[in-house]
Amino acid sequence: MRTLEALLFDVDGTLADTERDGHRVAFNRAFADAGLDWNWSVELYGELLKVTGGKERMHHFVETENPNVPQDVDLGEMIISLHAAKTEHYVGMLRDGLILLRPGIERILREARSAGMRMAIATTTTPDNVEWLLKSTLGAESIGWFELIAAGDIVKAKKPAPDIYTYALEQMNLSADNCVALEDSAMGLRSARDAGINSIIITANGYTLSHDFSDATMVVDHLGEPGNPFQYLSGMQPAGDMIDLSGIQKLHSGVVAEAG
């Protein structure tokens, strides 16, 4: 029976607006620490987000933007070092409480946990980044709310490849038909879709509003909070001002009914 058994969450841009004022700033600080004149503007970073994975993003930047690269250095090793430094800066921002959860995220996580709904993370960011985000916003105990944290280089191919979702489904012994994925980007949507997940909620953000979400089940700007209702964008029309667990279950049931 295709009932809803689990919620699978992306992290960057979905749980929190981490990209523009989080990861981007941390990258620029790492570049400065290394004596590089690289600087990722808000606009450039939006383009670079078309490549998933921080190390992969830096390789793409070097290949396409031709920045100054120190002579006699191994580019691969330099990028690994830069990424480690960037992670330190980003974790520092999390510790300082500079990264906040998106509207409705804490509410839906607590509601799902109280209802006994299985939850997992499926992301390309590092496990450290995930754990520090959870600890800094919800407390250390929140890490245990998730049955699985599938993150970073645990799979060979990153989003938009389906590998991270396929891995999560296999590890949790779940059918894709019994899950809802929550994402924020076209790459995340494709990743979940290609893993067989048909119920996908998109919470678009400033970097992803222009993405093609025609294959998503529902697209909103966020999940909504009391006094801060979501804005409906496309797909199935949700009821009320906030998307709650009951609404997600109805959305999943609607997808199942359409599939026959």
Image: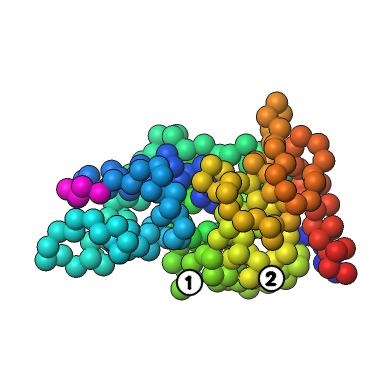
Q: How is the image coloured?
A: rainbow
Residue at which label 1 appears: 157
Q: Describe the element under mark 1 as helix, strand or loop.
A: loop
Kindly report the distance in space between the C-alpha atoms of the residues bearing marks 2 and 1.
Answer: 17 Å
**Dividing the picture into quarters, in which one does residue 173 lie?**
bottom right
- Give the left or right position of residue 19, taking residue 250 as reference: left
In what quadrant of the picture does the N terminus appear? bottom right
47 in the magenta segment: no
36 in the magenta segment: yes
Q: Residue at x 52, y 65 (%)?
A: 159
In the rendered image, the vertical position of residue 125 relative to residue 103, given as above or below: below
Q: Amino acid at mark 2?
A: Gly
Q: Is the stretch drawn in magenta largely helix, strand or loop?
A: loop
Q: Residue at x 69, y 61 (%)?
A: 215
Can see residue 191? Answer: yes
Q: Residue at the top extreme?
A: 227
Q: Which mark is residue 196?
A: 2
